Image: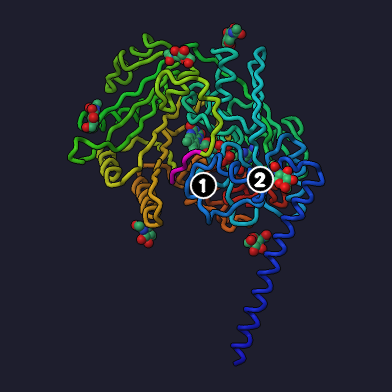
Amino acid sequence: METMRNLSFLVTTLTIAMSISTTLSQSSVQNFLNCLSHSHVSEIIHTPNNNSFSTILNMKIRNKKFKTPTTPKPQAIITVKDGNHVQTTIKCAKSNNIQIRIRSGGHDYEGFSYVSDVPFVIVDTLHLNSVDVNLQEETAWVGSGATLGKIYYTISKKNNSLAFPSGVCFTLGAGGHFSGGGYGNLMRKFGLSIDNIIDATIVDVNGNILDRKSMGEDLFWAIRGGGGASFGVILSWKLKLVQVTPQVTVFNVKRNVSDGATDVVYKWQLIAPKLHKDLFIRAQPNVVQIEQGGKKTVQVSFIGQFLGSVEKLLPLVSESFPELGLKKSECISMPWLNSTLFWYDLPIGTPLETLLDTPKDPQPTYLKFKSDYVKKPIPKEAIETIWKKMIEGESLYMQWNPYGGRMEEILSSETPFPHRAGNLFLIQYINTWVEDSPEAIDRHVNFSRSFYELMTPYVSNSPREAFLNYRDADIGANRPSNVTKIDIARTYGKKFFKGNFEKLVSVKAKVDPDNFFRYEQSIPTRS
Ligand SMILES: Cc1cc2nc3c(=O)[nH]c(=O)nc-3n(C[C@H](O)[C@H](O)[C@H](O)COP(=O)(O)OP(=O)(O)OC[C@H]3O[C@@H](n4cnc5c(N)ncnc54)[C@H](O)[C@@H]3O)c2cc1C
Ligand SMILES: *[C@@H]1O[C@H](CO)[C@@H](O)[C@H](O)[C@H]1NC(C)=O
Ligand SMILES: *[C@@H]1O[C@H](CO)[C@@H](O)[C@H](O)[C@H]1NC(C)=O
Ligand SMILES: *[C@@H]1O[C@H](CO)[C@@H](O)[C@H](O)[C@H]1NC(C)=O
Ligand SMILES: *[C@@H]1O[C@H](CO)[C@@H](O)[C@H](O)[C@H]1NC(C)=O
Ligand SMILES: *[C@@H]1O[C@H](CO)[C@@H](O)[C@H](O)[C@H]1NC(C)=O
Ligand SMILES: *[C@@H]1O[C@H](CO)[C@@H](O)[C@H](O)[C@H]1NC(C)=O
């Protein structure tokens, strides 16, 4: 009897507590919106009552897992047009204890830029998309909402000998992509995007708009690879452009296991990270169907880019990597700008203006991505085991991206991104599917995890390193996301940043001591 009464007392108290917390959060949202509209920015506020809300929310969602009726939706999306809008949003969110998520290109594999498990609003940098090239200085200021496509196009149209080293997918946003490192096929020659960024503007937790000089070298260090969203809202970046040959040579040759692809891959591991800096060759193992019988095999695409002519490329390859058997007829020369479309697998002749397309409600698929670093060659027998496991799966494939070159010359403490010398290549495990059932989702995610398990002996350990831009919540994530637990943060922090984690924590403690800018994998204020 006594117990029952206690229990019912407890239940009543809980119910009251819960309804208070709901009312509180609802009124705090209302207060947040009032706070914002006092500052005359209503035309940039999209709440679920506005028709524009779902259009804007959906325009960048790429992982179907986060586009369901039960996916938590933001209380509002603020499509900021300048630094003042960001200042006001931060001030109003802070005073009403509302979490903000910052979205630029929206490509985050785990949806951390547009989904949260606590009440939140999205700051979307959609309109901060200017690209201003200074030809004399060979620099460019770009807004954090600019896509890589717009950046590539604008630079190259001004001078086709200028370029910028960053990702292959040209719909990526400068805000997330650069603050997470940013790499692509110019990496062996010029390093990562962050190695070529010389200034930035950011709005901090106090609403100050800072540039490199006023933010100081520590914060400028942290946002180049540490993930911007732990530190503030990045408005823009200043890029030091790089010089490329007016024509580059590209190829995509495929070799099947039955014609010795395993030997070629084995040799690739030894040679690709040591090749001339001007040459980048990605190996992409994929499962293909042989004949109608349905028998499957592994086919490896060797996708390459050389900063120079085919006449210079061929002797280079036949000397250091004859196993590839690269033929002149397999090589195509084109301006660097055209090559950005080639790498995205678009047919030759695709108009360059495609690079300027703004993403409109992409048809999302389900995604599960993971990453690994390889430091010693994988033995041939192990490669064969890996192929067998791939064939057992339904849709998993890999991209192996060679390091070496410029990546070896940069100290691992120079930026938060620690994966420099001593890495042969980075593996990206890619699993995408369309089947919707909870069973199918489970099955695919399980397969990605068991594949990762199989790879354990062949990849980095203590810590098993991971690339921040290849966001993977499996390696540790805070849920609910409004409390950053130190032991969890240390787990993902060491994998992403190794020895740089401690410095990131000290920068965070200085610039955002109350941990306002937080999400599932943010930097904690103490270690
Ligand atoms: C198809 C595809 C291809 C890819 N190819 C490559 C590749 O070739 N090389 C590579 O390095 N990576 C690649 N990636 C990974 C990509 O770099 C990361 O997903 C990156 O974070 C995307 O940046 P975004 O602005 O588009 O994403 P968002 O989802 O908008 O942001 C990602 C993270 O950055 C934060 N953020 C975004 N904008 C800001 C800002 N203005 N200020 C502060 N924080 C911000 C977000 O809050 C979130 O934590 C690829 C991803 C996809 C989906
Ligand atoms: C959203 O709706 C409110 C209320 O009707 C309006 O004041 C505001 O301007 C709308 N926002 C946009 C972006 O249209
Ligand atoms: C975190 O969010 C949960 C769920 O919304 C809430 O119950 C809890 O009080 C919050 N904690 C903090 C520290 O804000
Ligand atoms: C384009 O850039 C290249 C590389 O810096 C430079 O040599 C060339 O003079 C530039 N051309 C023009 C027209 O500015
Ligand atoms: C590899 O196998 C596929 C499927 O049988 C076939 O279509 C292709 O021609 C083969 N490629 C090579 C290079 O042998
Ligand atoms: C590069 O793109 C331009 C513009 O679309 C086109 O005219 C040219 O033929 C392309 N060159 C190659 C080699 O694809
Ligand atoms: C996925 O793995 C979990 C945990 O090992 C297991 O319980 C579940 O049955 C698996 N689901 C499928 C569809 O294989």
Total number of numbered discs in the rendering: 2
Secondary element at tag 2: strand
Quadrant where the N terminus is found in the figure: bottom right
Which residue is rendered at x = 32% and y = 37% of the image? 378
Q: Is residue 364 magenta?
A: yes
Residue 511 seen in the figure: no
Whole-Å distance between the Cαs marked 1 and 2? Answer: 19 Å
Question: Mark 2 or mark 1, which is nearer the start of the sequence?
Answer: 2
Q: Is residue 52 magenta?
A: no
Q: From the viewer's perspective, is residue 4 above or below residue 228?
A: below
Q: Position of residue 93 (x, y in %)?
A: 73, 50
Q: From the viewer's perspective, is residue 127 above or below residue 92?
A: above
Q: From the viewer's perspective, is residue 418 above or below residue 314?
A: below
Q: Find residue 77 and name its label.
A: 2
Residue 137 seen in the figure: yes
Boundaries of the magenta span: 362-368
